[in-house]
Image (cartoon, rainbow, N blue to C red):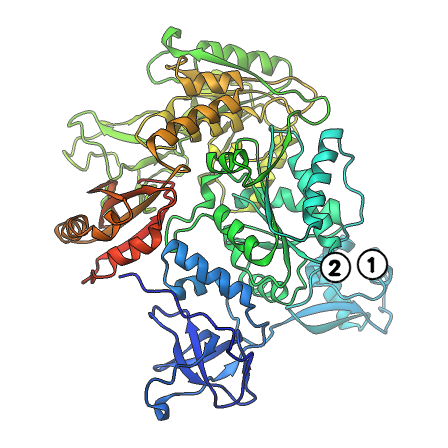
Amino acid sequence: MLKPPGRQATVSEPEFFDQGALVAVLTTQPLDRTLDYKAPEGGCLRGAFVEVPLGPRKVIGVIWGAGQGDFDRSRIRSVIRVLDVAPMRDEMKNFLTRAAEYTLTPMPAMLRLATRAPGLGDPPSMRKVYRLGQREPDRMTDARRRVLDTLIEYGGLAFTLKELAEMSGVTSSVIKGLTKQGAVDEIDSPRDMPLPHLDPERPGKELTGDQAAAADSLRTALRSDRYGTTLLRGVTGSGKTEVYLEAVAECLRMGRQALVLLPEIALTAEFLTRVDARFGARPAEWHSGVPMTERRRIWKMVGQGNAQLVVGARSALFLPFQNLGLIIVDEEHDTSYKQEDGVLYNARDMAVLRAAICGARVVLASATPSLESWANAQSGKYDMVELKARFGAAELPDMRAIDMRAEKLKAGTWISPTLRGAVQDRLAKGEQAMLFINRRGYAPVTLCRACGQQIGCDHCDARMVEHRFLKRLMCHQCGETRPLPTVCPSCGAEDRLAPVGPGVERLAEEAAALFPEARVVTLSSDLFGSARALKAEIERIAAGEADIIIGTQLVAKGHNFPYLTLVGVIDADLGLQGSDLRAAERTFQLMRQVAGRAGRAERPGTALLQTFQPEHPVIRAILAGDETGFWRAEAAEREVAGVPPYGRMAGIILSGTDVAQVFDLGNALARNDAPLRQIGAQVFGPAPAPIARVRGRHRVRLLVKAAKGAALQEALARWIAPFRLKGDLRLSVDIDPQSFL
């Protein structure tokens, strides 16, 4: 059952609670209300982060307001201590509360999003740092001299062992040797140190006329000091990043904090390098790949106002900014901004909500914006700034279709003769070619030729995908893996298992056979153990150390390969199948983004789309480059159907280990839909989810559709409230669903 949002502080409540006063504490534990405690010795501020007893445990919470005192006061326990971190601001409490109301999420779950910094209650940890000592070493070597010169050059500043070794070009043992002789001092220093200062007055790259005008528009909007959202729409390679970095610089000049959201961790390293070049220092970095101790440091520095700029994934929206003035959502159309488990939210929409609460500006940047953002710009709700030309001498690629109905391919091959000839032509010129297919692994299906059985996951209703490079089968739903079998698990036949269909690994195998002299590299998230390894491979490609790039959706996101002049899309029809209302939009965005990797330098680029449906409206719109025409046609269809952004939808996902119980709950919900009918909403279902079992849990979906102005969340809450979930039954609500799996 969904829990109501926690109570909000009222205007009449005090800012400070004296020792012994009753306070309401919201914890991160799955409870449906705040809990009353007594303020600790020395009192506490409203919004303070505290440690409180809960049964035999100690848990983290926030002073949410005055306590209710509606039960025996003698049983009320005291707050254990106030944590040494900045209190939660009212605007952050307001953001969490409104986000909870919009997504129908219990408040403790929202608070967990806002406290994802391990060890918040721990005392500051220490680390070893090194600075110039008082003594001379007994013997001077070239390596030792470099260490001492580095310390002298930086005026006696302290460095970590790694930093000092890298700056001096020596091994750590050289520094350790100097510490033993007192020439270098080893000191314990708090780990949660302030971040380096970013200088907004450093000159950026020289902008073109269009870029300068766009940057001026963003700066003017920022100086208004009021909330507003701007859609920064620019073709691939037009310099959107340089433009919005000028907006970041203006925000820093104003003394406010800025946040840049990126859709993929893989993009972070390259972007941080650009920020460092622009502002003379690296910003704070926030995503799952950041070490735990560094995440705690960043969380604290953001809360103290000592982090000027944060670059991160969608969860960075829930950091405790003190003076947030600007939020950039780069590649705002990207589906990875939608959180699909736990708290179901869209970071693009939450960015707009947070900015509206704290009076910040939002910049939504994309070459292929979401239809929602495009429609908001067309209606005047958002401002729009456009960059219509590529930077410098670069031109947009020539886009053409390869009609696969006229191509003759051998069985088990996917690169058409026309595309093969185009690749050979690029190789002869010393240029790079990219072959794109949006499927990970070697083959999406493994079939037994004896019995026809497809190997599926034991825990999900999904087929296992062969990953030949890893020599394993993998379920892309639950992550289950197993060794590649030689015997059919169904009929026991030996050596009759065959891969069906292409994945990125199989395409790489075919390319290596067709072009034996070429250097073929594969970019897929499965093949890299760390973001650093992926970054190194991308840098190698950009430096020209590859001839053919085989890639999945990963290659479509922001990478700049100056030698790349040909992009070949193996299956342009892949995203057009199915009943997803966003299928056309996503296919259009992906194809345009992938094609945009070609010709980003002086050499002109070409994009070839292999398709069996060259007459399909989406394929024709992609080839014509008529983005405005595509959006208008797509918007007209959605408006007639009354679906987002011209209507409202919510997905209800039910799950449990007993399929009969799950369907019983779904049928009961469908029968008792009076609260929804009162606002004119319709309920469709229940029906099995397209992937009906994941991790051993059966999944059933209902879909609610309502008019754009309907009070959907309130009706959903009243509809669901009477139902008590028994056993392991689970119910989640997905407002504005992006995926229907």
Residue 168 in view: yes
Frontmost residue, 460 versus 411: 460
Answer yes or no: do the residues labelled 2 and 1 have beta carbons within 8 Å? yes
Q: Looking at the image, which residue is at 82% across and 62% down? A: 151
- The answer to which quarter of the image holds residue 179 is bottom right
Frontmost residue, 677 versus 20: 677
- The answer to which quarter of the image holds residue 174 is bottom right
Q: Is residue 425 left or right of residue 412?
A: right
Q: Secondary structure at mark 2?
A: helix
Residue 295, x across and y down, in percent:
56, 61
Tally the numbered discs: 2
Residue 697, x across and y down, in percent:
23, 51
Sort mark 1 into few (<14), some (14-19) or many (20+) by Cα contacts within 10 Å: some
CA distance separating discs 2 and 1 = 8 Å
Q: Secondary structure at mark 1?
A: helix
Q: Is residue 461 left or right of residue 434?
A: left
Sort mark 2 into few (<14), some (14-19) or many (20+) by Cα contacts within 10 Å: many
Residue 670, x across and y down, in percent:
18, 48
Dot label at residue 164: 2
Name the residue beneath numbered marker 1: 150
Q: Earlier in the sequence, mark 2 or mark 1?
A: 1
Three-letter amino acid code of the residue under disc 2: Leu
Frontmost residue, 554 versus 140: 554
Q: Is residue 671 above or below residue 334?
A: below
Three-letter amino acid code of the residue under disc 1: Thr
Q: Is residue 724 left or right of residue 525?
A: left
Residue 442 in view: no
Q: Looking at the image, which residue is at 58% across and 11% down? A: 425
